[in-house]
Amino acid sequence: MGGARHIVKHGKNKGQTAKRLIALSVCAVFIAVSLLSATFVFTHTTHKHDRFGPDGNCATCTRLAEAAYILESICIAMAGAAFFLWGFLMALPAPTPVSFYRGFRTLVFLKVRLNN
């Protein structure tokens, strides 16, 4: 019977580990894509224009504008999330400091008589 509980507990822990690993990999991919797109924007800001692309527009300028728009949207969303988190944390009550001068709560401290 103790073994069955151990298996269920181990299975639950394995599921949580898998969820954490998936969340970590999604965060890593998000960070990598953000860094690569920012690198693309910074390295291609001074490029030669290809005026003879489709419809006479510069393909690199179009991609730069799209990447800059996406990065700006991400920055605005992150700033909003940070502001919301700051407000949420400020709404929580501050923890009270522990006072060591009270002493331990023993039966003698509480003046409890134990004789019958």
Image: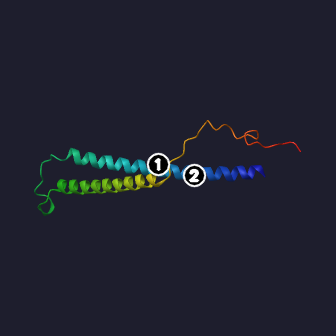
Element under label 1?
Answer: helix
In the rendered structure, find residue 24 and report the number of the disc placed on it.
1
In the image, 56: left or right of 76? Answer: left
- Which residue is label 2 attached to? 16
User: Within 10 angstroms of label 2, few (less than 14), some, or many (20 or more) residues?
Assistant: few
Observer-nearest residue: 15 or 100? 100
Mark 2–mark 1 Cα distance, whole angstroms, equals: 12 Å
Q: Position of residue 79 (x, y in %)?
A: 34, 53
Q: Position of residue 49 (x, y in %)?
A: 12, 51
Observer-nearest residue: 65 or 101? 101
Q: Position of residue 115 (x, y in %)?
A: 87, 42
Disc 2 vs disc 1: Cβ atoms closer than 8 Å?
Answer: no
The quadrant of the picture occupied by the C terminus is: top right
Indicate the amino acid at tag 1: Leu
Observer-nearest residue: 30 or 88? 88
Q: Position of residue 10 (x, y in %)?
A: 66, 49
In the rendered structure, find residue 49 and report the number of the disc placed on it.
none
Which residue is depicted at the point 78% across and 43% down? 112
